[in-house]
Amino acid sequence: MGFSMDNMKGFILALLSSGFIGASFIIKKKGLRRAAAVSGVRAGVGGYYYLLEPLWWIGMITMIVGEAANFIAYAFAPAVLVTPLGALSIIVSAVLAHFILKEKLHHLGILGCVMCIAGSVVIVIHAPQERAITSVQEIWNLATQTAFLLYVASVIVLVFVLIFHFAPRYGHSNVLIFTGICSLMGSLSVMSVKAVGTSLKLTFEGMNQLVYPQTWFFMLVVLTCVIMQLNYLNKALDTFNTAIVSPIYYVMFTTLTILASVIMFKDWDGQSVGSIISEICGFIVVLSGTILLHSTKDYERSPSRSIYPPLLHCAADAELLKHVDDDIQSSEEFCLRVQ
């Protein structure tokens, strides 16, 4: 069955969205590096000088344009077409990082990316259709269900634990900490964005939803979640390899968003057992790809620790050790600097 004109518009917008979003990761990271070079304080350790860096803002604008294109694409094409194309942003960022940031993506990393994309595609293909929403009050009733309130409470608790317990200890050694915070908050922001988008759509159609306090509450939730996402995404990009951050963030964000939607909108009600099993298998593939990507990151760090243990043991400059991943391209170069 061929593409309709509307589907073609959605397809082109989704491709443009992936290109802009993938490029934004690279532009923002270059901005973060420039800001760190000028201020001496990296975003990964609490620096905010990047807010004065024009290149970072160019990357931010690029991401906003990409997200806007993605949002508009959903108005023309079904989610089953648009959502999988978001995975192309991973490929775009990985390729650009290879040539612009000189960040190498090894064979295991490539396999991990493929697994993440494949698992995400399986989830999206078998995901059920979204239910029609007629008012923001209907979304409010769905959001105040016991099951979804328990999900929200779990997300808030996990975010606080990650921020105050795990981030200070493991945030700069485990890529899942910062990306986990972004993804958890992202799942709530998407639910709120749906509410805001529905209220605006209905308002434009003549049914004013801005008079309801629920609409403004959802707007506040969106603003809060987006600010937290940007903050911790910047920390992740400044600390870890872009080719690792991009797919892991995409996978975790997509997985948690689908989970939130299943709980809130009861998407699995009425689905066949085969479709549900296929979605679960997709989750398993995604999880496996994420673990493989993280293992690849550890593998990239391990040579300097295993081949030159005496030098690492005797090195007195702790700050040099902290910045091995960003400043040193090989174990040999590290040894030369220590000596």
Image (tube, rainbow, N blue to C red):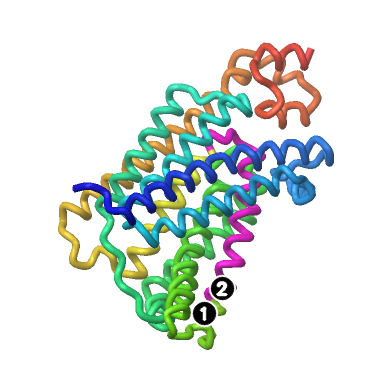
Q: Which residues are magenta?
A: 218-244
Relative to residue 121, is residue 37 drawn left or right? Answer: right
In the figure, 27 relative to 155: above or below?
above
Residue 173 position, x and y percent, is 61, 37
Distance (Cα) linking label 1 and label 2: 6 Å
Location of mark 1 (residue): 215
**Residue 257 figure quarter:** bottom left
Location of mark 2 (residue): 219
Q: Nearer the viewer, residue 215 or 2?
A: 2
In the figure, 87 relative to 155: above or below?
above
Q: Nearer the viewer, residue 195 or 12?
A: 12
Label 1: element kind: helix
Which three-letter amino acid code belongs to the residue tagged 1? Thr
- In this view of the protein, can residue 235 be seen by the observer? yes
**C-beta proximity under 8 Å, tags 1 and 2:** yes
Residue 152 position, x and y percent, is 47, 68
**Residue 287 figure quarter:** top left
Q: What secondary structure is the stretch in magenta mostly built from?
A: helix
In the figure, 13 relative to 113: above or below?
below
For residue 240: magenta? Answer: yes
